[in-house]
Amino acid sequence: VQLQASGGGLVQAGGSLRLSCAASGRTFSNYAMGWFRQAPEKEREFVSAISGGNTYYADSVKGRFTISRDNAKNIVYLQMNSLKPEDTAVYYCAAIRGCATMRDKDFDYWGQGTQVTVSS
């Protein structure tokens, strides 16, 4: 599976962005998808995942971010609303065959990352 993330950018606090992750190479619907992020000098952390009909969110983004997928287009989205400066990070999409977890080490395939910067 090859993953290509896009949609990052610079936005003011309170604004919105929608990240996209296009997948190719294997049967997209067989994979659970996740989003992780890494801020400067911090560990990579779980943001959200979608697995079957279930969605999962880190507490820090719950109620503000929404993950979704379009299996016909092989794309997973992360709609980010009410952005905060602490959301600033490089965001990565990842794929795992089977059920999603919140551990980055469990995911098999990774995209290249897209920078999200939220100004105060």
Image (cartoon, rainbow, N blue to C red):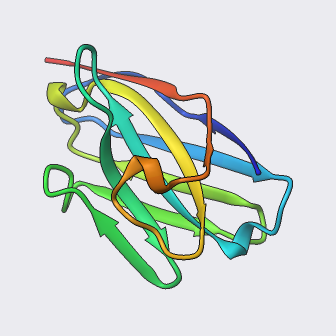
Residue extending farthest front:
105
Left or right? Give the position of 17 relative to 111: left
At 28% from the left edge and 47% from the top edge, which residue is drawn? 81
x and y, in percent, of residue 24 in the image: 82, 52
Asked which quadrant contains residue 39, the reply is top left
At 67% from the left edge and 57% from the top edge, which residue is drawn? 75
Left or right? Give the position of 56 relative to 74: left
Vertical placement of residue 78 versus 36, above or below: below
x and y, in percent, of residue 12 in the image: 25, 23
Asked which quadrant contains residue 42, the reply is top left
Q: Nearer the viewer, residue 55 or 81?
A: 55
At 39% from the left edge and 65% from the top edge, which residue is drawn? 101
Residue extending farthest right:
25
x and y, in percent, of residue 100 in the image: 46, 68
x and y, in percent, of residue 110 in the image: 60, 41
Vertical placement of residue 9 versus 68, above or below: above
Vertical placement of residue 23 versus 54, above or below: above
Asked which quadrant contains residue 120, the reply is top left
Residue extending farthest bottom:
53
Q: Nearer the viewer, residue 115 or 40?
A: 40
At 31% from the left edge and 49% from the top edge, which residue is drawn? 46
How many discs mark residues in the rendered view?
Answer: 0
